Amino acid sequence: MTVPAGLLLGMAVAAVLVGVGWWGRTVYRRMRVQERRNERLIRLLGRFRGPLDIRGPFARRVQDLFSFIAEHGRRFFYTIVNYGAAKAAIRKNDYVVFGALAALLLLAWPAFSLLGFLGIVAEVLAWILGVRALYTYIGGRYNTQLYEQLPDTISIIVRALRVGVPLPRILDLVCREASQPTAFEFTRLVQDIAVGQSLPQAFANMAERVDVTEYRFMATVIEVQAGTGGTLVDIMAMLEKTLRERRAIRKKAIAASGEVRLTSYVLLALPFLVVLLLEIQSPAYFNGLLADPRGYGVLALAGGLWCLGLFSIRFITARVLK
């Protein structure tokens, strides 16, 4: 019995993908183990500048090369999937990354069976766009919640300052009383202060971590007040007023652009409506398209253009409302 060449080629591609994925996972786990070992040695041997390294020069060069490749590969991967938008929202990133890579490997064979190597390319592009859309959605939703809760959080701080409560106790109060995810971010802020960071630096780290413009405003206010002095309660009260005005303006902009966004979504739904009507009127209309292997390429191209239109609309809308 002769094995088809396409089947052998597909199995070879799947084996290569599995091998690359397993190699990347192994390198990543070794890096994590080495980092934990270094941190443990630094804690135990704090009087030294770094951990004790007994490896030879060749082993150190190989390890440095693998670390360089793995680190830059991880940064490149995070850039193309826009992971920075959700780095504060997703707390267990390893499970998400390996789950997404497993889905990519599982879908490789069906894509190759339908369109050959073009199917592999289309699958990789669709996977990148899908993971990027997931991270963008999660990060945008997380930042929106922080943005909506920030004026109320500052209001808690202002009221507590006016009655003479110290700022460290106010931060603990915010950790207990504020809604999620604000309470989680302020808990991390309190933990940073507990390990020795200054108050302005802890606020700056939080603003960089969540990547919300209004949090940068608050970090700037704390930094300026710590450097020049002044009454913190008055500065925070003015910041609260400014943020509430900005939120009101943003809601007006969202309401004004609602008609345009609804029109764009109706236009995106028209192709599916036309296909449905044609299928009802003439069930055999698309038989020729589905019978020809080139028809799947046409469908993949149409789906890609539809996704491009959707992402373009969302990108333009997000830029206008930002």
Image: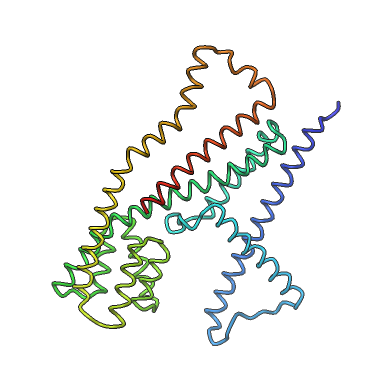
Horizontal arrangement in the rendering, residue 113 relative to residue 163 (left or right): right
Query: Residue at 27% across / 57% down in the picture?
Result: 246
- Does residue 214 lie above or below 116 as drawn? below
Q: Give the colouring mode of the picture.
A: rainbow
282 on left or right of 211: right
Question: In percent of the image, x 69 and y 55: which residue is there?
Answer: 23
- Closest to the observer: 123 or 11? 123
Residue 178 image point, x, y percent: 26, 59
Q: Residue at x 24, y 53 (%)?
A: 248
Residue 206 in percent (x, y) is at: 38, 67
Q: Looking at the picture, how far across and down is residue 306, in whole percent?
A: 52, 35
Q: Is residue 202 left or right of residue 62?
A: left
Q: Residue 299, how many percent across, how many down?
A: 60, 29
In the picture, residue 148 is in which quadrant?
Answer: bottom left
Quadrant in which the C terminus appears = bottom left
The quadrant the N terminus occupies is top right
34 and 233: which is toward the camera: 233
Q: Is 10 on the left or on the right of 281, as rendered?
A: right
Q: Pick whichever, 300 or 274, lies toward us.
A: 274
Q: Quadrant of residue 49?
A: bottom right
